[in-house]
Amino acid sequence: MTQSLDLNKMGQEPITQMEMQEVEGGKFINLLALILSVGTAIVAYIKAQN
């Protein structure tokens, strides 16, 4: 029992709702950046072909 309390003191407590949203937001932004860069590469490739 004391071990779990010590873990909480060390900052191992469950992720808060706010932190969870930040993680999801970060994933979304990374995905968006990936889609944009892939889209840009495709457009550049098509322009190079013509």
Image: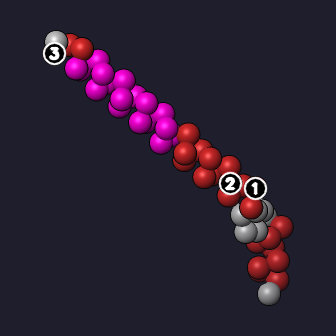
Q: Secondary structure at mark 3?
A: helix
Label pair 1/2, CB-CB below 8 angstroms: yes
Q: Which residue is mark 3?
A: 49
- Which percent across, then down, holds residue 18? 76, 55
Q: How many marks?
A: 3
Looking at the rendered image, the quarter that the C terminus falls into is top left
- 40 part of magenta stretch: yes
- 42 part of magenta stretch: yes
Point out the frontmost of discs 3 and 2: 3
Instruction: Left or right? Give the position of 42 relative to 23.
Output: left
Q: Alpha-carbon distance for marks 3 and 2?
A: 42 Å
**Tag 2: amino acid:** Gln
Q: Which of the marked residues, 3 or 2, is nearer the chain's N terminus?
A: 2
**Tag 1: amino acid:** Met
Q: Residue at x 77, y 79 (%)?
A: 4
Q: Which residue is mark 2?
A: 21
Q: Residue at x 60, y 52 (%)?
A: 24
Q: Which residue is mark 1?
A: 18
Instruction: Please tell me how crowded label 2 is: few (under 14), some (14-19), or many (20+) other residues with Cα within 10 Å.
Output: few
Point out the frontmost of discs 3 and 1: 3
Q: Alpha-carbon distance for marks 1 and 2?
A: 5 Å
Instruction: Left or right? Give the position of 47 relative to 27.
Output: left
